[in-house]
């Protein structure tokens, strides 16, 4: 039925929350010699999520997203510093946080034998590329489609249209996307009229309706 499987990275293949925690702890410790507690880490995560959604929905530029999240967080902590320098250090730290979920390797191997696999990620190209290499899963993907390089973010239909054009295949029936975010992966698939598989690791549901729902990547063999 399908020829191409588009797969999200953060929260789908890699544990972004744990990687984020490690990177923000390292960053703040480096600049301020301060050890963040769990409440402060959660505060950063909330701030980052808010500005990421603004960026994802084209309400701000990537540079504004990067600046605003650290500008607000540093003020919250009561510190002063070069926000751009702090953000750059954080991104460099983050790209080495390649924490693979336990249910990924065998299933990527399985999928790669049946379909053509492509990364479909909102993020920075160098960060995602490095993390996929470290996790040793880059070999399963023919190509990485990352929003920084594509020029559009999921759920924008233009993100997927870019992929269709690049592959020179405009048949929606040939594509399926797997992802953990309803507001980007699944909504993007719906906007583009391709099939969607929602990896619901955290038991989150809303009015966005995917074609399929799984709670573990191990269940992918029941669909594909």
Image (cartoon, rainbow, N blue to C red):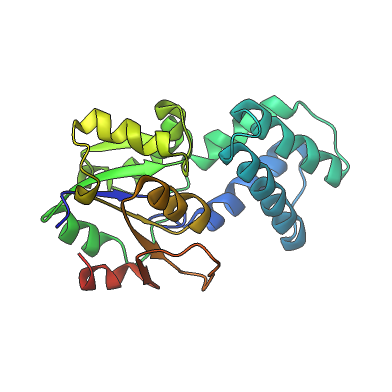
Front one among 99 and 158: 158
Q: Position of residue 51 (x, y in %)?
A: 67, 42
Front one among 167 and 220: 167
Who's the residue at 42% across and 39% down the image? 157
Q: Looking at the figure, which quarter contains the C terminus?
A: bottom left
**Residue 129 seen in the figure:** no
Asked if residue 195 is positioned above or below residue 67 in the image, the reply reads below
Left or right, 5 with respect to 32, comes to: left
Q: Position of residue 138 (x, y in %)?
A: 27, 43
Front one among 100 and 189: 189
The quarter holding residue 14 reads: bottom left
Asked if residue 122 is positioned above or below residue 205 in the image, the reply reads above
Who's the residue at 71% across and 42% down the image? 28
Who's the residue at 56% across and 35% down the image? 91
Q: Looking at the figure, which quarter contains the N terminus?
A: bottom left
Give the residue furthest to the right.
Answer: 78
**Residue 105 seen in the figure:** yes
Who's the residue at 85% across and 46% down the image? 76
Q: Position of residue 98 (x, y in %)?
A: 42, 49
Asked if residue 11 is positioned above or below residue 159 in the image, the reply reads below
The quarter holding residue 214 reads: bottom left
The count of marks equals: 0
Give the residue furthest to the left.
Answer: 113
The quarter holding residue 87 reads: top right
Left or right, 127 with respect to 170, comes to: right
Left or right, 35 with respect to 4, comes to: right
């Amino acid at each position: 039925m399908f020829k191409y499987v588009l797969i999200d990275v953060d929260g789908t293949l890699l544990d972004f929350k744990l990687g984020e925690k490690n990177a923000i702890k390292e960053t703040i410790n480096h600049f301020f010699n301060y050890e963040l507690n769990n409440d402060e880490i959660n505060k950063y995560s909330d701030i980052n999520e808010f500005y990421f959604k603004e960026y994802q929905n084209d309400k701000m530029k990537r540079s504004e997203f990067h600046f605003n999240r650290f500008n607000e967080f540093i003020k919250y902590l009561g510190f002063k510093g070069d926000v751009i320098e702090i953000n750059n250090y954080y991104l460099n730290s983050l790209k080495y946080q390649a924490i693979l979920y336990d249910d990924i390797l065998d299933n990527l191997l399985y999928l790669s034998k049946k379909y053509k696999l492509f990364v479909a990620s909102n993020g920075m190209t160098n960060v995602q590329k490095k993390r996929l290499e470290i996790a040793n899963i880059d070999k399963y993907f023919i190509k990485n489609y990352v929003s920084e390089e594509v020029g559009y973010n999921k759920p924008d239909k233009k993100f997927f249209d870019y992929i269709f054009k690049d592959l020179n295949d405009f048949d929606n029936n040939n594509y399926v996307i797997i992802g953990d975010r309803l507001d980007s992966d699944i909504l993007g698939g719906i906007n583009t009229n391709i099939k969607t598989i929602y990896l619901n690791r955290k038991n989150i549901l809303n009015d966005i309706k995917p074609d399929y729902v799984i709670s573990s990547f191990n269940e992918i063999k029941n669909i594909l």
